Image (cartoon, grey):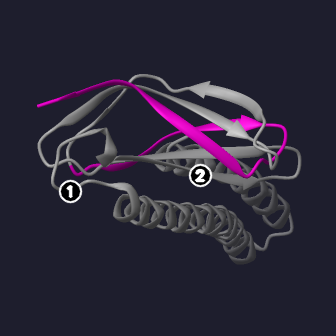
């Protein structure tokens, strides 16, 4: 779910709850002939609800941005170790899988980078998640992706029931100028 969508729906839901509380408080205090207090409760309820949900959304966004930044740094390090800056090749395509363990499952976030200067990659990627003994746990093939020269991006998340530390990948596409 994109952050614009999260902001929109989060604000709609919490705004609705805040509006319900605000209208209820307004009606209650209006019956008591306390119009000033009713207006303050109305504005306060709506404001507190919207600030609360936007605070939570902002924290999630900051955590996601931090994970993305760390993954991009791992992509850079991998390229420095394995890449070939003098030639345009598959050696300049990098992939990082970062597991994000939740209570009941693990979300494997997949990041890719193309360190080639002229060639784009178009195709799929086959990712194999392996356990500590290097046994295959599951394989995931991504949707078709296009990575332009110099581009880094997150392509998708894959959910699985447990966390496993190792992975390997294979590019199933082609480099084109």
Q: Are marks 1 and 2 in contact (CB under 8 Å)?
A: no
Q: Which quarter of the rendered picture does the C terminus lie within?
A: top left
The percent coordinates of residue 62 (x first, y second) are 54, 68
Which residue is located at x 68 percent, y 70 percent?
A: 48
Quadrant in which the N terminus appears: top right
Give the residue number, with chain letter if any, for mark 1: 85
Identify the element where label 2 is drawn. Answer: helix
Q: Which residues are magenta?
A: 150-177
In the rendered view, does 117 fall on the left or right side of 45?
left
Q: Which residue is mark 2?
A: 11
Secondary structure beneath dot 1 equals loop
Looking at the picture, tell me which residue is in the foreground, 159 or 95: 95
Residue 157 in the image: state x and y as whole percent: 60, 39
167 part of magenta stretch: yes
Separation of disc 1 and disc 2 at Cα?
47 Å
Q: Give the x, y percent position of residue 150.
A: 22, 51
Rendered view: 119 above or below 22: above
Q: Is residue 118 left or right of residue 70?
A: left
Q: Nearer the viewer, mark 1 or mark 2?
A: 1
Q: Earlier in the sequence, mark 1 or mark 2?
A: 2
């Amino acid at each position: 779910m994109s952050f614009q969508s999260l902001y929109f729906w989060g604000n709609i839901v919490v705004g609705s709850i805040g509006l319900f509380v605000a209208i209820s408080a307004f009606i209650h205090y209006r019956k008591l002939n306390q119009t000033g207090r009713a207006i303050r409760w109305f504005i306060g309820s709506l404001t507190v609800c919207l600030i609360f949900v936007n605070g939570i959304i902002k924290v999630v966004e900051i955590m996601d941005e931090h994970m993305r930044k760390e993954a991009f740094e791992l992509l850079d390090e991998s390229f420095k170790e394995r890449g070939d800056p003098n030639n345009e090749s598959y050696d300049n395509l990098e992939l990082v899988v970062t597991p994000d363990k939740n209570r009941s499952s693990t979300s494997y976030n997949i990041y890719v980078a193309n360190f080639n200067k002229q060639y784009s990659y178009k195709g799929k990627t086959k990712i194999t998640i392996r356990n500590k003994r290097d046994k295959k746990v599951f394989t995931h093939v991504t949707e078709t992706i296009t990575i332009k020269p110099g581009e880094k991006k997150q392509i998708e998340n894959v959910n699985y029931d447990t966390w496993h530390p190792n992975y390997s990948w294979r590019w199933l596409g082609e480099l084109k100028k």
